[in-house]
Image: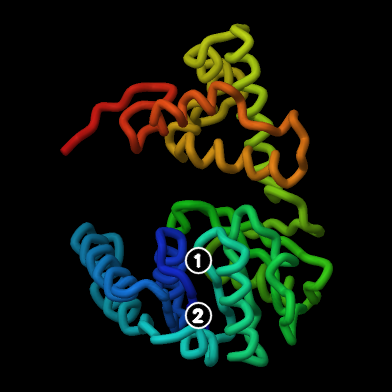
């Protein structure tokens, strides 16, 4: 089991799972979220998760108790980050919010490595005014973090070798497989490749070369992907695909990166994928 202290700031879906994973793997895990009641909701969810896994025989009762004992809610970024060896930021995808978190965390600890879980914002955008920017890098978990094996570690020009080594070792200590991106690039590795697949798929359907259903079949049967690109868009949310492509367009000004008209139409119609009951496919809503 791992030894050390992890501070997790931000208790949305990703932060909550990273925090629980850290505790499961043996880290003392301190959590903080600025939203009232967020920490309490996280701890209730943790109790429910551990109870369910215990009842199903997936983990021993003693392991569940030990995991829960490693988790503690804190009242500030300073209290969360101060004693930590590793700090994971998982707050909203807003540069200003993230910068504020990193400024506080940087002041709170002189030794901890500071990781952002952002999938879109590179760490070099978060280091203005930091005393120790060399301790900062992206450590990008995939959703759901409790299940997905991959972690992308992204080196910024400011990032030290020691921080990269620590980030890779931290990911391995959580049972993950880390890959190293040697320089920052928008979208990192996996999402850049995935975005290319989505864009080409949308182009083929928009130009009436092939249907949505046949394109998904072609990719699953021809390339061996477990899910076709349109089914995957429905799963992750068409609004997320749209916003990612719009961000790329705004950042570069390149018209070729503007979202497909098909995506725009889906957004206008409120067809956001599985979560709305309809996207490229229809889904029966259960109550």
In the displayed structure image, the side of residue 54 where residue 148 appears, left or right: right
Q: Residue beneath label 1, please?
A: 91
Q: Position of residue 101 (x, y in %)?
A: 57, 76
Q: Which mark is residue 165?
A: none
Q: Which comes sooner in the sequence, label 1 or label 2? A: 2
Q: Residue at x 47, y 14 (%)?
A: 213
- SS class of the residue under badge 1? loop
Q: Residue at x 27, y 66 (%)?
A: 45
- SS class of the residue under badge 2? strand
Do tag 1 and tag 2 residues touch (Cβ < 8 Å)? Answer: no
So how many labels did they put on this image? 2
Mark 1: few/some/many CA within 10 Å (<14, 14-19, 20+): many
Q: Position of residue 282 (x, y in %)?
A: 33, 22
In the displayed structure image, the side of residue 163 where residue 229 appears, left or right: left
- Residue 285 versus residue 181 in the image, above or below: above
Q: Residue beneath label 2, please?
A: 7
- Residue 95 versus residue 253 in the image, above or below: below
Q: Position of residue 58 (x, y in %)?
A: 29, 60
Q: Position of residue 245 (x, y in %)?
A: 63, 38
Between 74 and 226, which is closer to the camera in this rendering? 74
**Image quadrant where one finds the C terminus:** top left
- Residue 48 versus residue 255 in the image, above or below: below
Q: Residue at x 40, y 69 (%)?
A: 20
Per the model, the C-alpha gap separating discs 1 and 2 is 13 Å
């Amino acid at each position: 089991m791992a030894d050390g202290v992890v501070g997790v700031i931000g208790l949305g879906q990703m932060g909550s799972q990273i925090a629980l994973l850290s505790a499961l793997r043996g880290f003392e895990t301190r959590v903080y979220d600025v939203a009232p009641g967020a920490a309490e909701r996280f701890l209730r969810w943790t109790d429910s998760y551990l109870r369910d896994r215990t009842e199903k025989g997936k983990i021993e009762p003693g392991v569940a108790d030990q995991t829960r004992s490693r988790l503690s809610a804190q009242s500030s970024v300073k209290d969360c980050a101060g004693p930590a060896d590793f700090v994971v930021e998982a707050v909203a995808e807003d540069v200003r919010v993230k910068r504020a978190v990193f400024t506080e965390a940087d002041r709170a600890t002189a030794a901890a490595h500071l990781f952002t879980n952002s999938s879109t914002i590179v760490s070099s955008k978060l280091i203005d005014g930091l005393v120790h920017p060399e301790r900062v890098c992206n450590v990008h978990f995939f959703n759901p973090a409790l299940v997905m094996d991959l972690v992308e570690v992204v080196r910024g020009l400011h990032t030290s070798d020691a921080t990269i080594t620590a980030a890779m070792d931290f990911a391995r200590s959580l049972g993950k497989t880390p890959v190293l991106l040697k320089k920052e690039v928008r979208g990192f590795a996996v999402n850049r490749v995935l975005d290319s697949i989505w864009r080409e798929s949308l182009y083929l359907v928009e130009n009436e070369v092939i249907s949505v259903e046949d394109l998904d079949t072609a990719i699953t049967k021809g390339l061996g992907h477990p899910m076709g690109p349109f089914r995957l868009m429905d799963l992750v949310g068409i609004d997320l695909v749209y916003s990612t492509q719009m961000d790329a367009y705004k950042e570069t000004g390149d018209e070729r990166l503007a979202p497909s008209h098909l995506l725009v139409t889906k957004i206008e119609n409120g067809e956001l994928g599985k979560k709305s009951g309809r996207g490229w496919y229809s889904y029966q809503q259960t109550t």
